[in-house]
Amino acid sequence: MVLADRKSILFVLQLLMLLVYGQQRGIVVVSGLVMVWPGDRGIVVVSGRVTWSVESGQRRGLAVVSSRVTVQCGQQRAVLNGHVTLRSIAVLRGIAVQRGIAMISGRVNHSSAYARESSLLLEEVQVQALGSCALVITYDDTYDSVVQGFLAHPQKSTAPVTLFTDLKSNVGWIPPFEQTTLETCINYAFLVDDANHLLNLMAQVYQNQLNLRTKFLFFTHLKKEELPSFFNSAAISKIVNVLVVTKGATIGALQLYTHAFFEGQERISVKRMPTWANGRLLNFNKDFKWFPEKLINFNGFKFHVSTFHYPPAAIFEPQEDGSIKHDGLEVQLMMAIASSLNFTYNIATPKDGDKWGSLKADGYFSGAMGEAIRGEADISFANYFITTTRLKLMSMTRPYMIDYTCFIMPMPSPLPQYTAVVWPFQSSTWIAIVCCFIILPPFLSIMATRELHRHFHSLGNNILYVFGIFMNEAQDILPQSASLRLLVIMSWIFAVVVAVAYKSSLMAFLMVPSPAKPVNTMEELLVSGLKWGVRNRGGWDVWFRFSLDPISQQIAAGFEFVNGIDGGIARVLEGDFAFMNSGNYLRYLVASSFTDEYGQAELHIAKECYVPFRIGLGMPKDSVYTARFDDVIGRMVEAGMVTRWFNTLVDKAKQRQRETAKKKREEKGVVVEDTLALGLHHMQGPFILLSIGYLLGVTAMVIELLLFYCSTRSK
């Protein structure tokens, strides 16, 4: 006992002498649970393994460790929050500097063999699997020797390295991982002895500060029975490329583990990998990969899908046996993804009865989106628009379609039937024809100055002559001069073409009334006399309210809010309301519910639509299968399958509605004749023209009689 006390006293005295000696000569002294021997000036050897060379810049508070890591120190404390900004430069944990002496504290809790193998394994993984991407190493003081060995060993990789440490001495400190996201590509290594501490750290940073689609290397202490819970934790279960390193069965050996997804109806299962010992892998095959490919085959795993009846995205068709047949654009997309990735799924409506869902006052998010946010559903869809607000709550696939907001309104009433005689030509065409009729008679009179036939010298005769040409009536009197003949011939050709075009269209317009010009733009909507509105939820009006366009602001000011889509369509059917909603939904709605037996739409969708939205499938935040879904959806979109599915759904819905409309007409006993005879209703225009002609003729006759009577009395 006395001998032991004497040895302890001698050791303390030696240590004090070393400190004093080091202070006087400006030598860095490294203290810890290892022996320290000071070498020549500026050199310190730690346990005969790691040599730290200190340059003359020490007096300025600078030191170089292993020629790779720069330690920046103030007069009393080192910089804590620095990060890699230059290749091969990183910042270590804080180091107090006093009187030119740097004190680096650390405990070596691992055997030298374990530390050596860990540093060699870390280097091997970086070279073989991480490439030239930056490596961010986060470690506690238990792994000081591992990291020092990794940094001191001659490096085969030129990738930049960032070090974050001091985890134990700074309880609650979160490394600033967001500063490392400036790197083009990045990988992470966590060397934390306490697995619970590691999981707590990951839980705080994995959603906002880490790139979960890159590669992660975890050195920690785990028992075999603790591995399943570790891999199923909230943070680790969101990462695909994971390599876990724990102590092996023999001294200095390291056991490697990873996880697999969707095998044997288990969402996550533990996979043992080869053992690392003596600086190499043991018992591995030639196809070995540090980070094996995953999620190639989902092995028939059954996903839970939450959605509801919302055509054309999801269509629920009740069957006679009580079952529900599921169809729709997103259902077909889900079938294609399931076939490609080899998984199954069951579709269910939200348990709380809500549809899309909303955030309640107590923080509960209802509906199908709420189930996906909480992880109760693996996949959720119902024509979800991809917005920044939703992306903060859940993950969404790449867009499979672009949708727009459109107005649906009543079909404009047909024009009065008595105007049918003017429908074949547009107003501009009629104006041009009238101008030709007005100009041609005077022109004939001018051209007839050298005409021998005096009939063409009269303007009145020329008016009747031109009118006969326009009516395609043969004229008995022919001009004699060549110039007048040429003019009459060209007038005849023009009149024949116009008459043929008019006659060919007149019959169709007499039989089928022509609709009025529909509303297709916001400007037309403002002057149409219609009211307009939108659902009282969903934020549709916000896009117009904050627009800089004055027309959009007028539309926003006139919005009337209705209770849901059904309420909006009911207002439209009243005949004086325009309702704004998803363009795809409205097109399917018109095809499936507002199409007559002849295929004519009974409601009008404006051609000008607004606010493009990307549509995608929803799933829990940071789901590991989102990227695989994106791959399949990308191929479907590029192949044109989504557009084809949508058009097919609309065509089928229109055909069913036509058959339904025909069946209803037959049930009412209404008979539609194959041939249609023109009635007085169709011939209103010609009879009105005849009446106008009679009226003008009688008026002219009365005027002539009055003039004749007046002239007779005057004589």
Image (cartoon, rainbow, N blue to C red):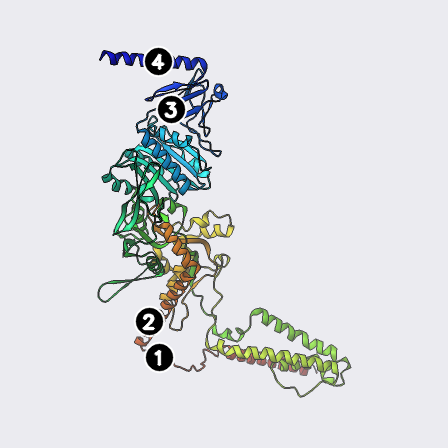
Q: Which mark is on residue 48?
A: 3
Residue under label 2: 660
Q: Which mark is on residue 14?
A: 4
Residue at position x 56%, y 77% in the image: 501
Residue at position x 37%, y 57% in the image: 568
Q: Which mark is on residue 671?
A: 1
SS at mark 1 in the image? loop
Residue 169 in the image: x percent, y percent?
Answer: 34, 25
Number of numbered discs: 4
Give how far apart the Cα atoms at labels 2 and 3 are: 91 Å
Identify whether 219 is placed above or below 410: above
Question: How crowded is the residue under tag 2: few (<14 C-alpha within 10 Å), some, or many (20+)?
Answer: some
Q: Which mark is on residue 451?
A: none
Say which of 213 and 248 sits in front: 248
Give how far apart the Cα atoms at labels 4 and 2 are: 102 Å
The amino acid type, in three-letter code, at marker 2 is Thr
SS at mark 4 in the image? helix
Give how far apart the Cα atoms at labels 4 and 1 are: 117 Å
The amino acid type, in three-letter code, at marker 1 is Val
